[in-house]
Image (spheres, rainbow, N blue to C red):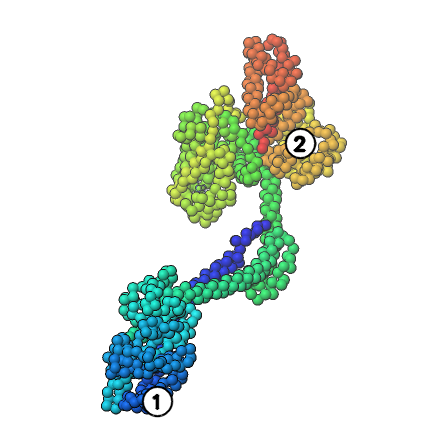
Amino acid sequence: MSNEKMSFWNSIVIKSAMLFTTVIVVALFLLGYLINRQASGVISDYSQDQMLHASSLVKKSFYSMLNEVANDIALISKSPAIDDYVNNPSAENHSTLEKSFPIILSEKPNYFQIRLLDVDDDGKEIIKYEKVNEYVEKVSFDRLQHKGEKKYYKEAMAMDDESFYYSEISLNEEFGKISRPHIPTLRAIGKVFNQEDQLKTLLVINVDVSAFFEEVNQIGKQEIASLIIDDRGEYKYANDTIKRFGRQLGTGEAMTNDYDIVLKDFLLETNRNGVFLNRQKVPHLYHLDEMSYSDGLHRLYLITTASKEAVLANVAKVNRDSLLMVIIVCLFLLALIYLYTNFFSRKLSKITLAISDYEKGKVPSDHLTKIKKRKDEIGLLARSFSTMRKEIDFRVVELKESLKREKKAVAEKNEFLQNMSHELRTPLNAILGLTKLLHKNKPSSAQIPIIDSLQRSAGNLNGLMHDILDQQKLMEGRITLHRVATNVDEQLQTIVSSYRFDTIQKGLELSLTVSSELKEKYYLIDPLRFNQIVTNLLVNAIKYTASGQIDIQAGVLERERSHLTIDVRDTGRGIDPQNLLNIKERFFRVMNENTLRIDGFGLGLSIVKKLVDLFGGDLNVTSELGKGSIFNFSIPAEVAPPDSSPASEAVLSYPKLQATYHVLHIEDDISSQLMVKNTLEAVGIAVVQTNSMRQALQLLDNNHFELLLTDLMLDSELITKYVRQELSQYNIPIVITSAFDSSKHKDLNADYFQKPVDLNQLVDKIISVLGGNEYDVPQLKSTYEQYDHKKEKIVNYLKILDKEFDQYLLRFNRLSTSKDQKEWSAIKHKIATHINAMQLTRLKEALPERIEDLQPDTLDLLLNQVKFMLCYFRNELRINLAD
Ligand code: ADP
């Protein structure tokens, strides 16, 4: 987790809150939309219903007005006053009538005229009362008129006897003029018969329909308005009085002017709902109904209408209200979600803080104490984390302990390896040295194979010791390559010949095929490590092949001429494909199916692999179980320049030492003591031996020694301490032999030989120290500096010197008999450079101009000086070759 800061938008809590908010908001808006749609529908339906209702109220009111008048007419017609008059139109009956008529007018506010028309006299008004400004007045005789020509008169006359007639509604006219004030008038007429059933008069009542209009006005309140028109579109009623009676008044007002309709089509079907536009193109909802009366003679159209906008205003209001509602609910929800997420993130951040504290290794804080008590998921999470923390702590402690144990085990293993190699190397050293001595002591022919076998076994053991050491060094990267011009063919021949005995013993054929290129040219490789690779592969081939043959093939790669390629083929047991990948691993071994034993130590191939890697090469294995294996490795190797000479085995010869030098040898292993004593005494050095350090110090105190050779028999730390504090005070050269790894003592002012000790090298070392008292010590410092202390160059240089001086030794020896002055001058000339470079003053003085002047003593000195130098070079070579 580290110090990572989580971005706001990455929080799961925020994300889920956002998601829920979005879902809720969308759902609310959807709901709002649905409600709105529903509401619009409901509202328009409601408006239509309202209109229908208004329409039916108007109708009801209209018809009840007609009924009322009809009832009144029926009643008045049957009144004794009228009955008497129609049966006997006497003056007396006329005056009776005159008394009853005004009562009717004053009782009925909306009746403003009542008349009797004489049917027999062309509709002449017999009696007429009218209401003027609330006063009922009798119309004087001279103002009575004939109405026989009037439309209403004719229509009334044409009616059934029992029916009542109602005229169209129009403004009242008197004497052909519209009377003022304008009175919208409906004329109701009933027929009056005499006893003989003869039609005598028409009873006419003029009804002022203003009251009805007022009622219509009342009904059509709010957004609903009513219109009453006739079949020609004239407004009988409109809210706006100016609009009314347009045709009669000649104003031109008509419904067709105000609405976008075709009257004929519009009126075609009644009792219906619809939408029309007014002149301003504003849509209006309407309900159309008809009111037919007077036995269908007249027809009025009733239109109840509402502007759609007005209706929709309601819908908009519902919209606004519901939107407001949605917003309020959303805000409320957001607030709720904010509180909720805040609550969660606070709790969670406490947990994450605790985790991060834990990660940083801080002491567990009490952030979680409260949260842990919660019963919800957060509490569970906090508790789980606490438990996990304890578990991890516990595991970490366990892990640390097991790591400690493992470290200890590794240390113990290393210590064991060290001790084991120490324990093994000392006797091994002795065995190897002593077998060599045995060989030198002219053994009998019967003893030779025994000694050889002894030597071979010791050699194998020695190989194993080296494998263990090399493995360790390779692991630590302490092995470096020293490339020198090498004849690969010779190297391979030597290896093959040293294993021929083993193959013959096992009944195997061993062959070596080397390409001509490898025979002719020298290649720059590290022969020691190259040999180690080939030897390991060959040893394995021999080890894992029961019968058949082993072939070693060497050449250069076709595609890459500067690469050597070496095959080691056998017809052995082969390797299971599933093990092929593992065999190069350290300590990997395969069980032998036949013996059910696991052979070897699993070191050989891992060393080979690491060495090939060090060379920068490739190791490949192809193998078939039961048929054999091919181990191939290829390594880059440049061809050595023509003048470079091959590394050669030095002919070991030592200078004679004039004085007898005393070496104190401290060693607790008797075999090693014996071996060293024999070797050093053979070159004329006196050896005093002891196995105790205490005694050694006494000896040092009481005697004079030129050199101290010691196996300290102590562990590595103590050796360092001992050499530094105790031995250094005697101021004599110290040579250490030890089974311990030399790398640990590099800083000691002592030369170091790791056991098993190569005795020749030990003698070289000791002679190059002691001989320094008698011979010129070659000064190599300046040359080393010249080579920048580069080991590879120094090694090459030393090898050349060694070879050259080896040749001088040979030539000086020959000169002692040939006395060839030319050769003498040539050598002198050649050696002169070395004399100067290495400051060989004694040698310089000893060389006479002429060969005749070379005294036997001088020659002897000369030869010993060269031998000393060879010893010295070999010793330098060893030091420089050491890792
Ligand atoms: P070691 O031979 O000491 O066991 P190595 O590392 O040399 O260890 O080899 C590892 C394993 O590889 C061996 O145990 C053996 O099973 C197998 N092996 C190596 N070389 C051969 C070979 N030439 N033929 C068959 N098996 C081999």
| Residue farthest right in this picture | 702
The residue at the point 48 percent across, 22 percent down is 641
- Where residue 693 appears, x then y in whole percent? 71, 37
Which image quarter: residue 232?
bottom left
Does residue 771 sit above or below 122 in this rendering? above
Q: Residue at x 52, y 25 (%)?
A: 647
User: Which residue was labeled with disc 1?
Assistant: 96
Which amino acid, mark 1? Thr
Q: CA distance from mark 2 to mark 1?
A: 174 Å
Nearer to us in this view, 492 or 854: 492
Picture disc at residue 812:
none
Residue extending furthest toward the front? 142
Label 2 CB less than 8 angstroms from ligand 1: no
Q: Nearer the viewer, residue 336 or 673?
A: 336
Q: Amino acid at mark 2?
A: Ala
Q: Residues within 10 Å of mark 2 (few under 14, many from 20)?
A: some
> Which residue, given by chain and number where applicable, does mark 2 sit on?
750
